[in-house]
Amino acid sequence: MAHGHTEAFCEFTFAAGRRLTGVGADHPCARVHGHTFLVRVSVQGPVDPLTGFVADFADLRRAWAPVHEALDHRFLNDVAGLENPTSEHIARWIWERLATALPALASIEVRETGNNGVVFRG
């Protein structure tokens, strides 16, 4: 059997408003706007010979639940640590909240539209 690591992921969404504070006043994102963000939480590791899993998807969903509660239908600028809520900052913020619960965490991908996004690897 081949050795190595496998990456498993779950995708989640949350809807939120924001205003980016690090751009000029004439930048469209300086105005209040919102997105339905797509977040991909990936874990990586060996496949457990007993379960056949890298991680149980139920564990990823359980770890995500409090993050979703903290972000969904919020004005992100009001969330501690997200005063300038760029997708880059959101990805790192999510990583910091999932890393303990998901020790095999490999990356957090945040998409703010179908074609734009960032990937954070801690």
Image: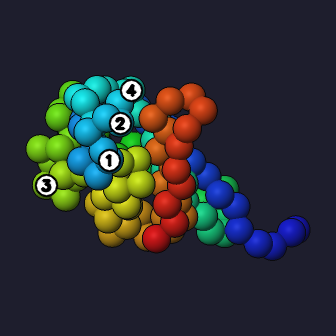
Q: Which mark is residue 27?
A: 2
* Comes first in the chain, label 4 or label 1: 1
Considering only vertical position in the picture, is 73 above or below 117?
above
Q: Residue at x 47, y 45 (%)?
A: 110
| Residues at discs 3 and 2 in contact (Cβ within 8 Å) | no
Q: Quadrant of residue 98?
A: bottom left
Measured in 3D between alpha carbons, the distance from the residue under mark 1 to the one under mark 2, in whole angstroms, is: 6 Å
What is the C-alpha distance between the residues marked 1 and 3? 20 Å
Q: Which amino acid is tagged 3?
A: Ala
Q: Is label 4 or label 1 in front?
A: 1
Task: Tell me if mark 3 has few (under 14), some (14-19) or many (20+) residues whose alpha carbon lies within 10 angstroms of its own.
Answer: few
Residue 105 against residue 14 in the figure, above or below: below
Q: Secondary structure at mark 1?
A: loop
Question: Residue at (11%, 44%) from the top-left corner?
Answer: 78
For disc 1, the marked residue is 23
Which colour style is shown? rainbow
Q: Is residue 88 visible?
A: yes
* CA–CA distance in space, label 3 to label 2: 24 Å
User: What type is the residue that disc 4 sits on?
Assistant: Thr
Q: Which residue is mark 3?
A: 80
Among all residues in the image, which is located at the extreme right?
A: 1
Q: Position of residue 49 (x, y in %)?
A: 68, 65
Q: Give the residue at x 81% y 73%.
A: 3
Amino acid type, callout 1: Val
Reading the image, the residue beneath label 4 is 36
Q: How much space separates mark 4 and mark 1, taking CA atoms?
A: 21 Å
Helix or strand or loop: what does disc 3 sit on? loop
Q: Earlier in the sequence, mark 1 or mark 3?
A: 1
Location of residue 20 in the rendering, given as x and y in whole percent from the top left corner: 28, 43
Disc 1 + disc 2, Cβ < 8 Å: yes
- At mark 4, the secondary structure is strand
